[in-house]
Image (spheres, helix red, strand yellow):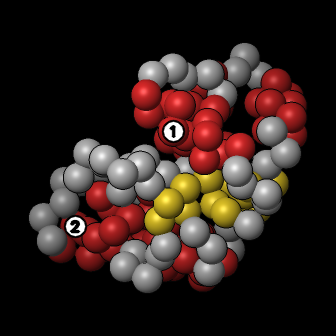
Amino acid sequence: MIFVDSSVLLDVMGSSGQQSAWSIEMFLGVEAPVINHVVLAEVSGRFDGAQALLDAVNDLQVDVLPLDHDIAHRAGRAFRSYRQKGGPRQTILPDFLIGAHAEQLGIPLLTRDTRRFRGHFPDLSLIIPEKTDD
């Protein structure tokens, strides 16, 4: 099982370019991809309705896992640490909810966006491109 970040899922759902090629290649190698409702919300803008979104996720054989209180708490603590280190408030919580969820499950996160995950979830295993924007 591997947690798939929205950056990768968006690529798989139709982006193009070198980064998209990496995302698609990596995604195709995942046996049991999972996301949560945060990722679902982040990719939903590509779809006219909720059913079209769910159909696309089902076609990709991605399981959507629910968040729980422990995940929300861990994400909130990571976000607080981020703010205390001078992180701007305009950055909202989604990446922290995604990182906390993958961390709690003890599974790797497939992502192209590493900055917040590395800095605030040091025990989280990341699957990332060789060259990142860090």
Q: Which residue is drawn at 51% across and 31% down?
A: 20
Q: Which residue is drawn at 33% across and 61% down?
A: 116
| Mark number, residue 83 | 2
Displayed quadrant of residue 50: top right
In the picture of the structure, the residue carrying the numbered disc 1 is 22
Name the amino acid, label 1: Trp
Residue at the outermost top position: 48
Position of residue 101 in the picture relative to residue 47 (left or right): left
Position of residue 39 in the picture relative to residue 89 (left or right): right
Displayed quadrant of residue 133: top left
Q: Residue at x 49, y 52 (%)?
A: 111
Q: How far apart are marks 1 and 2 (CA)?
A: 31 Å
Element on which disc 2 rests: helix
Residue at the outermost left position: 86
Quick one: 108 or 91, which is closer to the camera? 108
Element on which disc 1 rests: helix
